[in-house]
Image: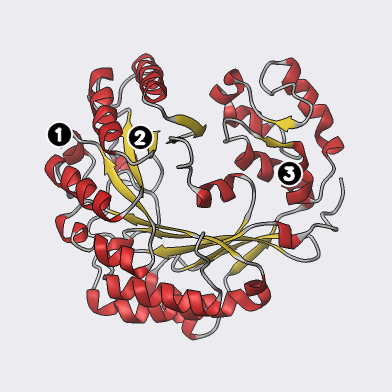
Protein backbone atom coordinates (compact mmCIF):
# COMPACT_ATOMS: atom_id res chain seq x y z
CA UNK A 1 0.00 0.00 0.00
CA UNK A 2 1.13 3.55 -0.65
CA UNK A 3 1.95 5.86 2.25
CA UNK A 4 -0.83 8.27 1.41
CA UNK A 5 1.42 10.87 -0.25
CA UNK A 6 0.41 12.70 -3.39
CA UNK A 7 -3.10 13.52 -2.19
CA UNK A 8 -4.81 16.63 -3.52
CA UNK A 9 -5.66 18.13 -0.13
CA UNK A 10 -7.63 20.99 -1.64
CA UNK A 11 -10.01 18.47 -3.22
CA UNK A 12 -10.96 17.04 0.20
CA UNK A 13 -13.93 18.94 1.68
CA UNK A 14 -13.28 20.54 5.08
CA UNK A 15 -16.20 21.02 7.49
CA UNK A 16 -16.54 22.41 11.02
CA UNK A 17 -18.09 20.63 13.99
CA UNK A 18 -18.88 22.72 17.10
CA UNK A 19 -19.75 20.91 20.34
CA UNK A 20 -22.00 22.33 23.05
CA UNK A 21 -21.56 20.04 26.08
CA UNK A 22 -24.60 20.86 28.23
CA UNK A 23 -28.12 19.44 28.50
CA UNK A 24 -30.98 20.39 30.78
CA UNK A 25 -31.09 16.74 31.83
CA UNK A 26 -28.97 13.76 30.84
CA UNK A 27 -31.02 11.12 29.04
CA UNK A 28 -30.49 7.56 30.35
CA UNK A 29 -29.60 6.20 26.88
CA UNK A 30 -27.15 8.96 25.90
CA UNK A 31 -23.41 8.28 25.71
CA UNK A 32 -22.54 11.60 24.04
CA UNK A 33 -20.41 14.14 25.87
CA UNK A 34 -23.13 16.05 27.71
CA UNK A 35 -23.36 17.48 31.21
CA UNK A 36 -26.09 18.94 33.39
CA UNK A 37 -26.07 22.18 35.40
CA UNK A 38 -25.81 24.59 32.50
CA UNK A 39 -25.37 28.20 33.60
CA UNK A 40 -26.63 30.76 31.06
CA UNK A 41 -24.16 33.29 32.43
CA UNK A 42 -21.32 31.10 31.10
CA UNK A 43 -22.43 31.42 27.47
CA UNK A 44 -20.13 34.32 26.65
CA UNK A 45 -17.06 32.65 28.13
CA UNK A 46 -17.77 29.43 26.22
CA UNK A 47 -18.23 31.26 22.92
CA UNK A 48 -14.91 33.01 23.57
CA UNK A 49 -13.28 29.61 24.15
CA UNK A 50 -14.77 28.21 20.94
CA UNK A 51 -13.41 31.11 18.92
CA UNK A 52 -9.98 30.78 20.50
CA UNK A 53 -10.10 27.05 19.81
CA UNK A 54 -10.88 27.78 16.16
CA UNK A 55 -8.04 30.28 15.95
CA UNK A 56 -5.58 27.79 17.46
CA UNK A 57 -6.53 24.92 15.16
CA UNK A 58 -7.43 26.69 11.93
CA UNK A 59 -3.98 28.02 11.04
CA UNK A 60 -3.51 27.81 7.29
CA UNK A 61 -6.58 25.58 6.92
CA UNK A 62 -8.65 28.69 6.30
CA UNK A 63 -7.28 28.59 2.74
CA UNK A 64 -9.49 25.55 2.16
CA UNK A 65 -13.14 26.62 1.73
CA UNK A 66 -15.57 25.83 4.52
CA UNK A 67 -17.86 22.99 3.40
CA UNK A 68 -20.48 22.90 6.19
CA UNK A 69 -21.03 23.63 9.88
CA UNK A 70 -22.73 21.43 12.46
CA UNK A 71 -23.62 22.76 15.92
CA UNK A 72 -24.10 19.61 18.00
CA UNK A 73 -24.22 18.48 21.58
CA UNK A 74 -25.43 18.25 24.17
CA UNK A 75 -28.08 20.82 23.48
CA UNK A 76 -26.84 23.83 21.47
CA UNK A 77 -30.31 25.39 21.72
CA UNK A 78 -29.69 26.12 25.40
CA UNK A 79 -27.64 29.03 24.02
CA UNK A 80 -29.35 32.26 23.03
CA UNK A 81 -29.75 33.48 19.47
CA UNK A 82 -27.34 36.32 20.25
CA UNK A 83 -24.64 33.83 21.33
CA UNK A 84 -25.09 31.73 18.18
CA UNK A 85 -24.99 34.88 16.05
CA UNK A 86 -21.74 36.03 17.67
CA UNK A 87 -20.21 32.61 17.03
CA UNK A 88 -21.27 32.40 13.37
CA UNK A 89 -20.33 36.02 12.64
CA UNK A 90 -16.83 35.42 13.97
CA UNK A 91 -16.48 32.18 11.96
CA UNK A 92 -17.60 34.06 8.86
CA UNK A 93 -15.01 36.81 9.39
CA UNK A 94 -12.19 34.35 10.11
CA UNK A 95 -12.97 31.65 7.56
CA UNK A 96 -15.86 32.74 5.36
CA UNK A 97 -19.30 31.13 5.37
CA UNK A 98 -20.39 30.99 1.74
CA UNK A 99 -24.03 31.32 0.75
CA UNK A 100 -24.20 27.61 -0.09
CA UNK A 101 -22.72 26.43 3.23
CA UNK A 102 -25.08 24.20 5.20
CA UNK A 103 -25.29 25.32 8.85
CA UNK A 104 -27.09 22.73 10.97
CA UNK A 105 -28.06 23.16 14.60
CA UNK A 106 -29.41 20.51 16.97
CA UNK A 107 -32.32 21.53 19.17
CA UNK A 108 -34.69 19.96 21.66
CA UNK A 109 -38.46 20.51 21.53
CA UNK A 110 -38.81 22.43 24.81
CA UNK A 111 -41.15 25.39 24.45
CA UNK A 112 -38.54 27.94 25.55
CA UNK A 113 -36.20 26.73 22.82
CA UNK A 114 -38.90 26.77 20.15
CA UNK A 115 -39.34 30.49 20.82
CA UNK A 116 -35.71 30.96 19.80
CA UNK A 117 -35.93 29.35 16.38
CA UNK A 118 -36.42 32.67 14.57
CA UNK A 119 -33.33 34.12 16.25
CA UNK A 120 -31.27 31.08 15.21
CA UNK A 121 -32.40 31.49 11.61
CA UNK A 122 -31.49 35.17 11.71
CA UNK A 123 -28.11 34.23 13.17
CA UNK A 124 -27.28 32.16 10.09
CA UNK A 125 -28.51 28.64 10.91
CA UNK A 126 -30.25 27.25 7.82
CA UNK A 127 -30.99 23.66 8.88
CA UNK A 128 -32.51 22.50 12.18
CA UNK A 129 -32.28 19.00 13.65
CA UNK A 130 -34.96 18.29 16.27
CA UNK A 131 -34.51 15.49 18.82
CA UNK A 132 -38.11 14.25 18.87
CA UNK A 133 -37.37 10.50 19.49
CA UNK A 134 -41.07 9.60 19.87
CA UNK A 135 -44.55 11.11 19.82
CA UNK A 136 -45.84 8.71 22.51
CA UNK A 137 -45.77 10.22 25.99
CA UNK A 138 -45.12 6.88 27.69
CA UNK A 139 -42.06 6.31 25.54
CA UNK A 140 -40.81 9.86 26.01
CA UNK A 141 -41.09 9.45 29.77
CA UNK A 142 -39.23 6.12 29.68
CA UNK A 143 -36.48 7.75 27.59
CA UNK A 144 -36.08 10.56 30.11
CA UNK A 145 -37.05 13.25 27.63
CA UNK A 146 -38.14 16.60 29.06
CA UNK A 147 -40.80 17.26 26.39
CA UNK A 148 -44.14 15.63 25.66
CA UNK A 149 -46.06 14.90 22.47
CA UNK A 150 -47.74 18.32 22.30
CA UNK A 151 -44.47 20.17 22.83
CA UNK A 152 -42.85 18.09 20.08
CA UNK A 153 -45.62 18.98 17.62
CA UNK A 154 -45.46 22.69 18.54
CA UNK A 155 -41.68 22.69 18.15
CA UNK A 156 -41.95 21.18 14.66
CA UNK A 157 -44.57 23.75 13.67
CA UNK A 158 -42.34 26.57 14.96
CA UNK A 159 -39.35 25.12 13.12
CA UNK A 160 -41.28 24.92 9.83
CA UNK A 161 -42.14 28.60 10.09
CA UNK A 162 -38.45 29.47 10.12
CA UNK A 163 -36.53 26.72 8.31
CA UNK A 164 -36.82 25.13 4.88
CA UNK A 165 -34.62 22.21 5.90
CA UNK A 166 -35.46 20.22 9.04
CA UNK A 167 -34.38 16.82 10.35
CA UNK A 168 -36.44 14.86 12.86
CA UNK A 169 -34.71 12.26 15.07
CA UNK A 170 -36.98 9.27 15.72
CA UNK A 171 -36.06 6.15 17.74
CA UNK A 172 -37.46 2.65 17.43
CA UNK A 173 -37.03 -0.60 19.34
CA UNK A 174 -38.25 1.07 22.54
CA UNK A 175 -39.40 -0.74 25.65
CA UNK A 176 -42.89 -2.14 25.06
CA UNK A 177 -43.03 -0.74 21.53
CA UNK A 178 -45.02 -2.67 18.94
CA UNK A 179 -44.75 -2.42 15.17
CA UNK A 180 -47.95 -0.36 15.18
CA UNK A 181 -46.43 2.01 17.76
CA UNK A 182 -43.31 2.49 15.66
CA UNK A 183 -45.36 3.14 12.53
CA UNK A 184 -47.47 5.69 14.41
CA UNK A 185 -44.29 7.61 15.28
CA UNK A 186 -43.12 7.46 11.67
CA UNK A 187 -46.51 8.58 10.35
CA UNK A 188 -46.40 11.63 12.63
CA UNK A 189 -42.86 12.39 11.50
CA UNK A 190 -43.55 11.91 7.79
CA UNK A 191 -46.57 14.21 7.94
CA UNK A 192 -44.50 16.95 9.55
CA UNK A 193 -40.98 16.47 8.20
CA UNK A 194 -39.63 18.85 5.59
CA UNK A 195 -37.65 16.09 3.96
CA UNK A 196 -35.24 14.36 6.36
CA UNK A 197 -35.76 11.77 9.10
CA UNK A 198 -33.06 10.06 11.15
CA UNK A 199 -34.66 6.76 12.17
CA UNK A 200 -32.51 4.57 14.36
CA UNK A 201 -32.81 1.76 16.87
CA UNK A 202 -32.29 2.34 20.58
CA UNK A 203 -29.07 0.62 21.63
CA UNK A 204 -27.77 0.26 25.17
CA UNK A 205 -24.33 1.86 25.42
CA UNK A 206 -21.71 1.74 28.15
CA UNK A 207 -21.46 4.68 30.55
CA UNK A 208 -25.21 5.31 30.42
CA UNK A 209 -27.94 4.87 33.03
CA UNK A 210 -29.56 2.25 30.80
CA UNK A 211 -26.33 0.21 30.83
CA UNK A 212 -26.52 -0.03 34.63
CA UNK A 213 -30.28 -0.62 34.67
CA UNK A 214 -31.33 -1.76 31.19
CA UNK A 215 -34.96 -1.55 30.14
CA UNK A 216 -36.77 -4.54 28.67
CA UNK A 217 -36.51 -4.15 24.90
CA UNK A 218 -38.35 -5.96 22.09
CA UNK A 219 -36.90 -9.30 21.00
CA UNK A 220 -35.02 -9.85 17.75
CA UNK A 221 -38.10 -10.98 15.82
CA UNK A 222 -40.08 -7.93 16.92
CA UNK A 223 -37.16 -5.65 16.08
CA UNK A 224 -36.92 -7.17 12.62
CA UNK A 225 -40.67 -6.69 12.08
CA UNK A 226 -40.41 -3.03 13.13
CA UNK A 227 -37.40 -2.50 10.87
CA UNK A 228 -39.03 -4.09 7.82
CA UNK A 229 -42.36 -2.31 8.28
CA UNK A 230 -40.72 1.06 8.97
CA UNK A 231 -38.43 0.89 5.96
CA UNK A 232 -41.34 -0.04 3.69
CA UNK A 233 -43.43 2.84 5.05
CA UNK A 234 -40.66 5.40 4.59
CA UNK A 235 -40.06 4.29 0.99
CA UNK A 236 -43.78 4.47 0.23
CA UNK A 237 -43.73 8.01 1.66
CA UNK A 238 -41.06 9.16 -0.78
CA UNK A 239 -38.01 8.84 1.48
CA UNK A 240 -34.78 7.21 0.33
CA UNK A 241 -32.42 5.49 2.75
CA UNK A 242 -29.13 7.02 1.74
CA UNK A 243 -27.27 6.02 4.93
CA UNK A 244 -27.76 3.44 7.70
CA UNK A 245 -30.15 5.59 9.75
CA UNK A 246 -30.75 8.57 7.43
CA UNK A 247 -33.79 8.90 5.17
CA UNK A 248 -34.40 11.85 2.87
CA UNK A 249 -36.57 13.09 0.07
CA UNK A 250 -34.70 14.25 -3.08
CA UNK A 251 -32.24 17.05 -2.41
CA UNK A 252 -32.68 16.90 1.37
CA UNK A 253 -29.65 14.79 2.34
CA UNK A 254 -27.42 16.21 5.09
CA UNK A 255 -24.35 17.61 3.35
CA UNK A 256 -22.38 17.69 6.59
CA UNK A 257 -23.03 14.03 7.35
CA UNK A 258 -22.30 13.03 3.76
CA UNK A 259 -18.89 14.61 4.23
CA UNK A 260 -18.30 12.25 7.18
CA UNK A 261 -19.38 9.19 5.22
CA UNK A 262 -17.23 10.07 2.20
CA UNK A 263 -14.17 10.40 4.47
CA UNK A 264 -13.95 14.17 4.18
CA UNK A 265 -12.09 16.31 6.70
CA UNK A 266 -13.62 18.20 9.61
CA UNK A 267 -12.27 20.49 12.29
CA UNK A 268 -13.71 19.83 15.75
CA UNK A 269 -13.96 22.61 18.34
CA UNK A 270 -15.59 22.55 21.76
CA UNK A 271 -15.45 20.30 24.83
CA UNK A 272 -14.97 16.69 23.73
CA UNK A 273 -15.05 17.58 20.02
CA UNK A 274 -13.39 15.21 17.57
CA UNK A 275 -11.81 16.15 14.26
CA UNK A 276 -10.19 14.49 11.25
CA UNK A 277 -7.63 16.35 9.17
CA UNK A 278 -5.52 15.27 6.19
CA UNK A 279 -2.11 16.91 6.22
CA UNK A 280 -0.27 18.05 3.06
CA UNK A 281 2.16 15.12 3.38
CA UNK A 282 -0.74 12.66 3.24
CA UNK A 283 -0.97 11.85 6.95
CA UNK A 284 -4.51 11.57 8.31
CA UNK A 285 -4.87 12.62 11.94
CA UNK A 286 -7.68 12.35 14.46
CA UNK A 287 -8.01 15.11 17.06
CA UNK A 288 -9.92 15.28 20.34
CA UNK A 289 -10.52 18.00 22.91
CA UNK A 290 -10.95 17.47 26.69
CA UNK A 291 -14.45 16.24 27.54
CA UNK A 292 -15.18 18.18 30.75
CA UNK A 293 -16.13 21.81 30.10
CA UNK A 294 -13.89 23.14 32.86
CA UNK A 295 -10.90 21.15 31.58
CA UNK A 296 -11.60 22.29 28.03
CA UNK A 297 -11.81 25.95 29.05
CA UNK A 298 -8.53 25.65 30.97
CA UNK A 299 -6.79 23.98 28.02
CA UNK A 300 -7.91 26.74 25.65
CA UNK A 301 -6.76 29.43 28.12
CA UNK A 302 -3.34 27.74 28.23
CA UNK A 303 -3.20 27.43 24.40
CA UNK A 304 -2.93 23.64 24.61
CA UNK A 305 -3.51 21.85 21.30
CA UNK A 306 -6.01 18.99 21.09
CA UNK A 307 -4.84 15.41 21.44
CA UNK A 308 -3.67 14.15 18.06
CA UNK A 309 -3.30 10.63 16.71
CA UNK A 310 -1.97 9.71 13.29
CA UNK A 311 -3.98 6.96 11.63
CA UNK A 312 -1.44 4.30 10.55
CA UNK A 313 -1.39 3.69 6.81
CA UNK A 314 -2.45 0.06 7.22
CA UNK A 315 -5.55 1.18 9.12
CA UNK A 316 -6.75 3.63 6.48
CA UNK A 317 -8.71 0.97 4.53
CA UNK A 318 -10.92 0.06 7.50
CA UNK A 319 -11.26 3.73 8.50
CA UNK A 320 -12.47 4.57 5.00
CA UNK A 321 -14.83 1.59 4.76
CA UNK A 322 -16.24 2.24 8.24
CA UNK A 323 -17.64 5.45 6.81
CA UNK A 324 -18.18 4.92 3.07
CA UNK A 325 -19.97 1.58 3.31
CA UNK A 326 -22.63 3.17 5.55
CA UNK A 327 -23.92 4.81 2.38
CA UNK A 328 -26.56 2.67 0.72
CA UNK A 329 -25.23 3.49 -2.76
CA UNK A 330 -21.61 3.28 -1.65
CA UNK A 331 -18.97 5.44 -3.34
CA UNK A 332 -17.04 5.54 -6.58
CA UNK A 333 -13.87 3.48 -6.34
CA UNK A 334 -11.80 6.52 -7.30
CA UNK A 335 -12.78 8.18 -4.03
CA UNK A 336 -10.81 5.54 -2.12
CA UNK A 337 -7.52 6.74 -3.58
CA UNK A 338 -8.56 10.40 -3.49
CA UNK A 339 -9.23 10.26 0.26
CA UNK A 340 -6.54 7.84 1.43
CA UNK A 341 -3.79 8.00 -1.20
CA UNK A 342 -3.93 4.19 -1.38
CA UNK A 343 -4.29 2.12 -4.53
CA UNK A 344 -7.41 -0.05 -4.66
CA UNK A 345 -5.27 -3.03 -5.67
CA UNK A 346 -4.30 -3.25 -2.00
CA UNK A 347 -7.84 -4.31 -1.07
CA UNK A 348 -8.55 -6.34 -4.19
CA UNK A 349 -8.27 -9.71 -2.41
CA UNK A 350 -10.67 -8.82 0.41
CA UNK A 351 -13.01 -7.20 -2.06
CA UNK A 352 -13.09 -10.31 -4.26
CA UNK A 353 -13.92 -12.51 -1.27
CA UNK A 354 -16.76 -10.25 -0.17
CA UNK A 355 -18.17 -10.12 -3.71
CA UNK A 356 -18.13 -13.92 -3.94
CA UNK A 357 -19.99 -14.12 -0.61
CA UNK A 358 -22.68 -11.75 -1.88
CA UNK A 359 -21.79 -9.05 0.63
CA UNK A 360 -20.17 -6.49 -1.67
CA UNK A 361 -21.34 -5.21 -5.05
CA UNK A 362 -19.61 -6.67 -8.10
CA UNK A 363 -19.77 -3.30 -9.93
CA UNK A 364 -16.13 -2.69 -10.96
CA UNK A 365 -16.20 1.07 -10.35
CA UNK A 366 -18.03 1.14 -7.00
CA UNK A 367 -17.40 0.25 -3.39
CA UNK A 368 -20.82 -0.63 -2.00
CA UNK A 369 -22.45 -3.35 0.05
CA UNK A 370 -25.31 -5.46 -1.25
CA UNK A 371 -28.64 -5.61 0.66
CA UNK A 372 -27.24 -8.69 2.43
CA UNK A 373 -24.01 -6.84 3.23
CA UNK A 374 -26.02 -3.94 4.61
CA UNK A 375 -27.56 -6.31 7.16
CA UNK A 376 -24.11 -7.48 8.25
CA UNK A 377 -22.28 -4.19 7.82
CA UNK A 378 -20.08 -4.46 10.91
CA UNK A 379 -18.80 -7.84 9.77
CA UNK A 380 -18.08 -6.52 6.26
CA UNK A 381 -16.13 -3.52 7.58
CA UNK A 382 -14.13 -5.70 9.97
CA UNK A 383 -12.76 -7.70 7.03
CA UNK A 384 -10.75 -4.64 5.95
CA UNK A 385 -8.87 -4.43 9.23
CA UNK A 386 -5.13 -4.97 9.13
CA UNK A 387 -4.18 -8.29 10.80
Please state which of the two labelled residues, at mark 2 or mark 3, is closer to the viewer. Answer: 3
Q: Is residue 275 left or right of residue 167?
A: right
**Is residue 43 left or right of 149 when viewed as pictured?**
right
Contact, CB < 8 Å: mark 3 with mark 1? no
Residue 348 sits in quarter? top right
Say which mark, if any, is on residue 335: 3
Q: Toward the viewer: 133 or 332? A: 332
Which residue: 59% across, 44% down? 261
Q: Nearer the viewer, mark 3 or mark 1?
A: 3
Reading the image, the residue beneath label 2 is 202
Q: Quadrant of residue 252?
A: top left
**Is residue 35 at least partly visible in the picture?**
no
Query: CA–CA distance between discs 1 and 2?
Result: 15 Å
Q: Name the quarter where the C terminus is drawn.
A: top right
Q: Against 92, is 279 above or below?
A: above
The picture places residue 300, in percent across and down from the top left corner, at 49, 80
Q: Dot 1, how many residues are within 10 Å of its Cα: few (below 14), some (14-19), or many (20+)?
A: few
Query: Residue 222 occupies which quadrant of the picture?
Result: top left
* Direction from residue 284 to residue 291 in the image, left or right: left
Of 340 and 293, which appears nearest the observer? 340
Mark sitting earlier along the chain (2/3): 2
Mark 3, secondary structure of its residue: helix
Residue 109's place in the image compared with 186, above or below, is below
Q: Residues within 10 Å of mark 3 (few under 14, many from 20)?
A: some
Amino acid sequence: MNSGSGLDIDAIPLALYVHFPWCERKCPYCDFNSHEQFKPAEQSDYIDALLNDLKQQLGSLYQRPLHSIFLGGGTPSLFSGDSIERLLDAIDKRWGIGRDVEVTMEANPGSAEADRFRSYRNAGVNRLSLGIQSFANRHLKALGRIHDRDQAIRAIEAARLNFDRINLDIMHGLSGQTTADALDDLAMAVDRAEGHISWYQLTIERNTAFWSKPPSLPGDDSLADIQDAGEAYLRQSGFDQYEVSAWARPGQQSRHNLNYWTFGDYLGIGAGAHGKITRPGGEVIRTQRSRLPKDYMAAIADNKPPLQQVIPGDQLPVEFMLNALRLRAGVNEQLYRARTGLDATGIAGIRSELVSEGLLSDAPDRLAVTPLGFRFLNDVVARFMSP
